[in-house]
Every structure is written in structure tokens, then in C-alpha cells.
Amino acid sequence: MKKRVVITGLGVVSPNGVGIPKFTEAIKNGVSGIQFLPKLRDLNFSCQLGATPTISEEKKRDYLSELQLRNFNSSGILYGIIAGMDAFKDAELEPAKNDEEPLWDLGIIFGSGTSGVEKFREAIYKIDDKNVRRLGSNSVAQTMTSGVSAYLGGLIGAGNMVTANSSACATGTEALLMGYEHIANGKATYMLCGSTSDQGPYIWGGFDAMKVTTYKYNDSPEKVAGPMSADASGFVPGSGAGAYLLESLESAQKRGATIYAEILGGAINNGGQRGGGSMTAPNSLAIQKCITSALKNANISASEIDYINGHLTATIKDPEEIENWCIALNRKGADFPYINSLKGMVGHCLAASGSIEIVSAILQLYEGFIFPNTNCENLHPKIASLVSQEKISMKTLKNPLQTIVKASFGFGDVNACAIFKKI
Amino acid sequence: MNSEEIYSLLEPIIKNYLPEDVSPKQINRSSDLTRELNINSAHLVDIILDIEDVFNIEFKNEDMENLRNVNDAILLIQKKATI
């Protein structure tokens, strides 16, 4: 018998708000974190817009010691630590004391795409300058993929599995489902899961070169055509981290914890880079199968879904995603669930997109609202032909959501879909 | 540079690497850096790099093998610093 799993803590470092209260306020009001970044202009980027969280020096010191911050230069790890510790504290758990045993029942799965590029760049310059000995002791910890989970593991004293997953833009949703399985199978009581992504030109450059970002709004960041818009011309690169503390229902009830939502189940699959799928494009059949498998795993019918938190990136693939949802749920027009995409406000936070968006989805479920889609007045005609406009709101709606779904898709033809219920 | 002068420059370097529960007052010339001051052994290389910057000297791998306590560091610096 599988254990039921719930979410009892949330943390977020988002371009439009750091910390749950600020982020909740921002998404309710459609506040954008997208900005013109002069540095990208100076580096000849096509897309000179980006979305990065603002973190003061003082804030860093709430999480890390002066010693840990010496020569610290990894934005993604910093975001992950802040989001992770916030989720842990939000669940009202206490770290293991220094002279005690670790928390054997608490594990961590915190993913990233690539981690610590700024630190890695620093190291590469020193190495090429024949100065490898000048790297110091912190180059490895700040560039390893498991950097966030390693830092968090130390801060908390985690004694269960502490690891990092990586599946491009599906990383955050995958981390949640991996943590869910771990608890459901009785291998841990608490799993701190999430994902992070560095900010800046070294992480965004490759996407700029692929022309999947937009070059059309450098002078008007507030007007960038959002996901599902007919004018959508590519995404704005973002960064940040999202985190959730997963816990067995049994344990959460026993200690009287705040329960944000139950994770009913989900699915992870791959399109095999076949049937229209490739390194960079999704196999539609695999997406449909991922969604239907998630419903089956959660033991609910498609008609129960009230709301979809889409992957929807503001690229040419948005209409295809909507079509896949319609086919998988067998719902369209006015019968289609409400749907929105956070990427209109925070850009595409890449490896962090899944986790930041899951946090946004859980907040909507818990508080009963649906945040507005941004700059999508001119709905893409193909999407308009599939879904009633009222389901793609430009305004914040109050709605007593009960069952919601989140999906993330990524390079390598990876898909992940998770289903949550209010409890 | 006499050992007093070296010590006065060395102490603030070491202070940076003390764990939070070790007071800077515990630093003295015979303090074993890892065993007594509880400095993470990974940070010894950072201390060496900071010393190199402050004293404008360069250590070899063999020099580091002899670094255990504050006095060892002072002797090493005296040996390397010609002025």
C-alpha cells in the first residue's frame, strides 16, 4: 500500500518576487520580472531581456555564513539554498543539531540544468592561465550539479538520499515526482525537492544562438508577447529556484502541519526523439501519453481537472501543446479547464521553470485563485479554435480549485506531469 | 619582517576560516589549525592563497605538508619572504 504524500512547505526565488508572500502578491497582480539587461546588449545578444531575482547582500547572510560567502559566485546555488531553506522553514521543521545524528527520514532531490556557470568561468580562466592552484577550495562545490542539495544537506543535516536530478526544463517537475515516489514507497518521511537555474549570459547564450528567445521587445520589456499569444516570438530567459517540502500525509497530520495540497500522482516519460520528437522538439504522442498516464496514476478522470499550469513558453510550440492537452483530456472549447502560464511574468526559468511554476500552481490551489495570463490579448488563432477565451483569463480570477495538473517538457524529449488536489 | 609583524597580518586571515563556534580569541601561536581551531582541512589551501596574496610570496606543494599550526605558518612565511 503506497503512502499518501502532501506538500507542507514552499519556497521560491522568482524574478517577480523572492519569498512566498511577495511571490503570491506578484502573481495575483500579474507583476512582471522581465527587464532590459544592458549587459546582454553589450554582449551582442539578440534578446537583451532577461528575468532575474533580486537578492540583497543582507539577505544572503540570512542563509549563509561569511565564510560560506567568501569567493561565492554561483547564482543558481544561492537561489536553490534560499528557496530550499524557505520551504524547510515553512514546514516548521528543525535542522539536526551539530552534535546530533542527521535526520535519517529527510532526503533532498534538488535539480539543475547546469550549475555554477559563473564560478566555472572564473575557474576556466585561471586554469588556462596556468594557475590551477589558485582555484581555492570552493570551486568544486560551487560547480557540481549536486551543489544545491549538498549545501542544503549540510544546513539541514539531511540523512536520507541527498541528490540532484537533471532533465532540462522538466527538472523541477521530475524532482517533485521522484520525491513523491520515495515517500509513497516508504523510503523517507520528508523530501525537500526543487530545482534551480543560474542567471546571466553564460547560461542563456546557447538559447540566444538557437533563436528560441525573442529579439522583438528589447525596447519594451513590459510588452513582450506572452505564451499563447498570436504575436509570441520566442521566450525571455529567466532564472531562480522553487522548492517544496514533501511529507507523508500520516506524518503531516500527526504533527499538525499546514497542508498545501496532496500530490495524487504523476508520470514521467520520453518521446524517444521519434515521431516528430527531437533533441529540441517534443513528440506530441509522448506528451499525450504522459498526461493520460498521470491521470491513471492519480486515479482520477480528465473531467475532474479544474486547472492546467502549462509549460507554454511563448514559442511556436504553444498551439501544439494546447492541442495535446485537448486530445489527452478529451476536452475542448468551454469544457476545457482554466489554463495559464507563469512564463509571461518571469520568462522561461529553464531548469527552474518547473519548480517555480509548481509553487505558483500550489498557491493558486491553496488560496483559490487563478493568476492572469500576460500580454496575450491577441490569442493565437489555433488556440482560440480549441479553447474558449474565458478559460485563458487576462485577469485574476477567484476560483475554488480542487484538482489541478502541471506539466513540463524539455530538451531531450523529456516530459513530466503531476496532479495535485486540495485537502 | 619579524614574527610579531607576521603574526599581526596572519591572525586576521585565519580568523576568516574559523567555524562559527570557535572564538578568534582561541588563536595563538601553537594552535593546531584543523585539530584545535577546527578549521575544515579543505580551507587550508584557501589560507595558503590568502597568505600568498598578503605577503606576496608563493608556496610549493611540499611547503604545505609542513603546515600544522600558526607557528609553522610564521616560519614558512619568514623563509619565503626575503624582505
Image (cartoon, coloured by chain):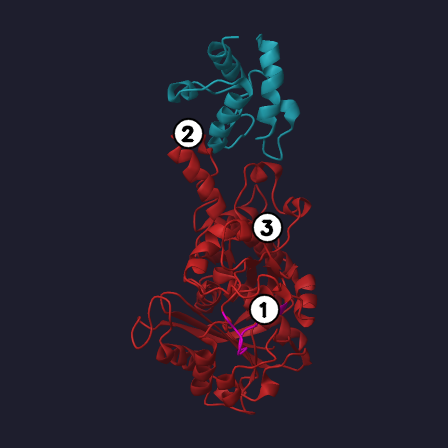
Classify 10 Å Cα crowding around label 1: few (below 14), some (14-19), many (20 and above): many
Measuring from the top left, give residue A237's x and y in whole percent: 52, 61
Amino acid at circle 1? Val
* Disc 2 from disc 1: Cα separation: 46 Å
- Number of the front mark, 2 or 1: 1
Which residue is tagged 3?
Answer: A95
Tag on residue A224?
1
- Number of the front mark, 3 or 2: 2
Tag on residue A133?
2
Amino acid at circle 2? Arg
- Pinpoint the chain carrying mark 2: A
Measuring from the top left, give residue A81's x and y in whole percent: 56, 51
Callout 2 secondary element: helix
Magenta region: A223-233
Q: Which chain is cyan?
A: B
Q: Quadrant of residue A133?
A: top left
- Pinpoint the chain carrying mark 3: A
The mark that comes first in sequence, 3 or 2, is 3
**Relative to A202, residue A220 above or below:** below
Q: Share a chain, discs 2 and 1?
A: yes
Judge by depth and name the residue closer to the eye, A41 or A269.
A41
